[in-house]
Image (cartoon, rainbow, N blue to C red):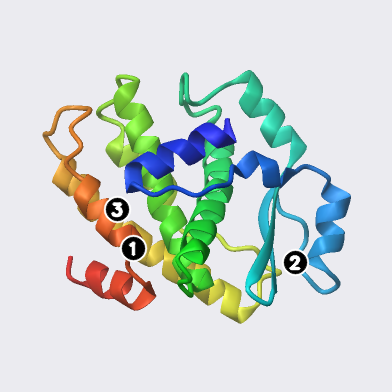
């Protein structure tokens, strides 16, 4: 399913990379804990690991085995609903991070962790909304916004920089996705009215993204 989510994102943003996310996927929680290293936050259900070696970047995506099992038995691409939405968004975030890193690295563009988190917020909203509309749930926009951008609850073991980064991504993601939702109001499902906007946004750097959102 992760490869299908990657292809969906690539179609949305008109980007391509010569790699497939499932080739970099692992489920071993103990290994993920060791890779995170001493002093890292406790293991989380999804985490992208990156190590730069000169011009090369080594990447692995950890997703908790139980999450993948639940998604295989209750495929959100076939039917996205309240019971599988959380796992779907978690998996999509991992795919989003992987694709954004790989595409920018392929174009020798420097990116920030805030950029990755902000783009993931947008990717989750856009992809979930697209599935809802395809599956005949056109009135779920407000509910999806509430689910994604309700009160932010951060883990207590995050440091100050991490808390500030997640809070900023949440704030700017909410503002941008609310603006996207307003542009879709009254439009029938399947109309690619946002493709040009989304593709332009995807190619912006962090400063451009934040300035663009401030315009709304």
**Between marks 3 and 1 in the image, the one whose residue lies nearer the viewer:** 1
Left or right: 41, with 103 as reference point: right
Name the residue located 43 percent from the left edge and 62 percent from the top edge. Answer: 118
Secondary structure under the numbered disc 3 in the rendered image = helix
Assess whether mark 1 and mark 2 are in contact (beta carbons under 8 angstroms): no
Marks 2 and 1, the one that precedes in the sequence: 2
Q: Nearer the viewer, residue 207 or 108?
A: 108
Disc 3 residue crowd, few under 14, some 14–19, many 20+, Cα 10 Å: many
**Between marks 2 and 1 in the image, the one whose residue lies nearer the viewer:** 1
Quadrant location of the N terminus in the rendered image: top right
Disc 1 residue crowd, few under 14, some 14–19, many 20+, Cα 10 Å: some
Secondary structure under the numbered disc 2 in the rendered image = loop
Left or right: 90, with 202 as reference point: right
Residue 144: x and y, percent? 37, 40
Circle 1 residue: 203
In which quarter of the view is residue 156 placed?
A: bottom right
Marks 3 and 1, the one that precedes in the sequence: 3
Quadrant location of the C terminus in the rendered image: bottom left
Name the residue located 32 percent from the left edge and 23 percent from the top edge. Answer: 134
Disc 2 residue crowd, few under 14, some 14–19, many 20+, Cα 10 Å: some
Circle 2 residue: 41
Residue 71: x and y, percent? 62, 28
Marks 2 and 3, the one that precedes in the sequence: 2
Secondary structure under the numbered disc 1 in the rendered image = loop
Circle 3 residue: 177
């Amino acid at each position: 399913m992760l490869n299908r989510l990657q292809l969906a994102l690539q179609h949305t943003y008109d980007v391509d990379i010569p790699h497939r996310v499932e080739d970099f996927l692992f489920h071993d929680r103990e290994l993920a804990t060791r890779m995170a290293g001493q002093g890292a936050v406790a293991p989380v259900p999804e985490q992208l690991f990156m190590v730069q070696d000169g011009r090369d970047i080594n990447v692995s995506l950890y997703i908790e085995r139980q999450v993948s099992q639940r998604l295989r038995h209750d495929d959100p691409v076939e039917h996205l609903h309240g019971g599988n939405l959380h796992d779907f968004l978690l998996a999509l975030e991992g795919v989003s991070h992987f694709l954004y890193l790989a595409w920018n690295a392929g174009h020798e563009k420097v990116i920030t962790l805030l950029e990755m988190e902000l783009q993931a917020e947008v990717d989750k909203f856009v992809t979930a909304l697209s599935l809802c509309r395809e599956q005949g749930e056109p009135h779920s926009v407000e509910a999806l916004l509430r689910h994604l951008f309700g009160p932010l609850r951060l883990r207590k073991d995050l440091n100050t920089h991490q808390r500030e980064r997640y809070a900023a991504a949440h704030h700017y993601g909410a503002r941008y996705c609310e603006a996207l939702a307003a542009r879709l109001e009254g439009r029938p499902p399947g109309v690619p009215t946002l493709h040009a906007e989304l593709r332009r946004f995807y190619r912006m750097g962090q400063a451009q993204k934040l300035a663009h959102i401030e315009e709304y």
